[in-house]
Image (cartoon, helix red, strand yellow):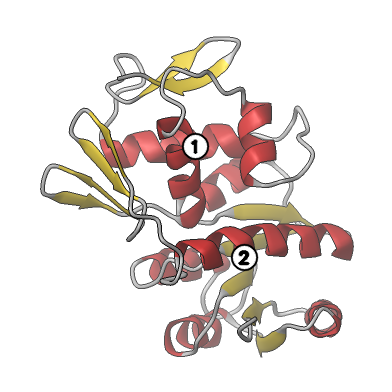
Amino acid sequence: MEEINILVVEDEKEISELIKTNLEKEGFSVYQAYDGKIGLNMALTKDIQIVILDIMLPNMDGLEVCRQIRTKKNVPIIMLSAKSQDIDKIVGLSIGADDYICKPFNMMELNARIRSQLRRYLYLNDSNINKNNTIMVKDLMIDLESHEVSIGDEEIKLTPTEYDILVLLAKNIGKVFSSEKIFEEIWEDKYYETNNNVMVHIRNIREKLNDNSKDPRYIKTIWGVGYKIEK
């Protein structure tokens, strides 16, 4: 397996060192940054496969770092924060984060989230895997080989998690997926009723596809049940 480089952007050095030590035991190489500007520069200039990003950072907060990374790179981003309010989680996911963990957190949980994100990211970027398949839904095209999404001539930029959710629904035309089922399929983790990750990602996908939730062209909500894509 190729070397996996993880960037930890966290200003609390004790937490950063704890994460670094744990990840190195798991066989990962770890870069560290203690403020937002340095973290952003490292994310954009180094060969990074995943970013662990705190929200409260000096010089540039984690939300702005996330926004700027997303303009250049599509690597998975897991946000860390002492803030547990839903609005903070929604903002983080809305600007391009793939996952969100509240402090204090269990290192086993962080490891599981990292490995889940890496499995999907590395698979999507493995040129040796033959994914010569294209999914068409009306004028929406999903190229499973290049993992590009487009509507007509317009390319749609999705995060890795958004892409995976869209592919899951598009591969199962007409099948309704509950939020719980989507979460367990994509995150490969246990779903909790208070977890609104799926709802936020669905909303983000719709916005990028210009898909009106009240009169959807692509992703339809089956109230009280879940989501589906119809031909």
Residue that mark 2 sits on:
118
Q: Nearer the viewer, residue 173 or 96?
A: 173
Q: What amino acid type should be assigned to the residue bearing mark 2?
A: Leu
Q: Is residue 206 above or below residue 188?
A: above
Q: Is residue 164 above or below residue 52?
A: above
Q: Is residue 158 left or right of residue 61?
A: left
Q: Residue at x 78, y 80 (%)?
A: 16
The C terminus appears in which quarter of the rendering? top left
How far across and down, in percent of the image, does residue 208 sit?
A: 31, 42
Q: Is residue 124 above or below residue 163?
A: below
Q: Nearer the viewer, residue 137 or 76?
A: 137
Give the number of the disc on residue 168.
Answer: 1
Give the number of the disc on residue 184.
Answer: none
Q: What amino acid type should be assigned to the residue bearing mark 1?
A: Leu
How far across and down, in percent of the image, does residue 165 sit?
A: 49, 40
The N terminus appears in which quarter of the rendering? bottom right
Q: Quadrant of residue 13?
A: bottom right
Q: Which comes sooner in the sequence, label 2 or label 1?
A: 2
Asked which secondary structure carries label 2, the reply is: helix
Q: Residue at x 81, y 77 (%)?
A: 19
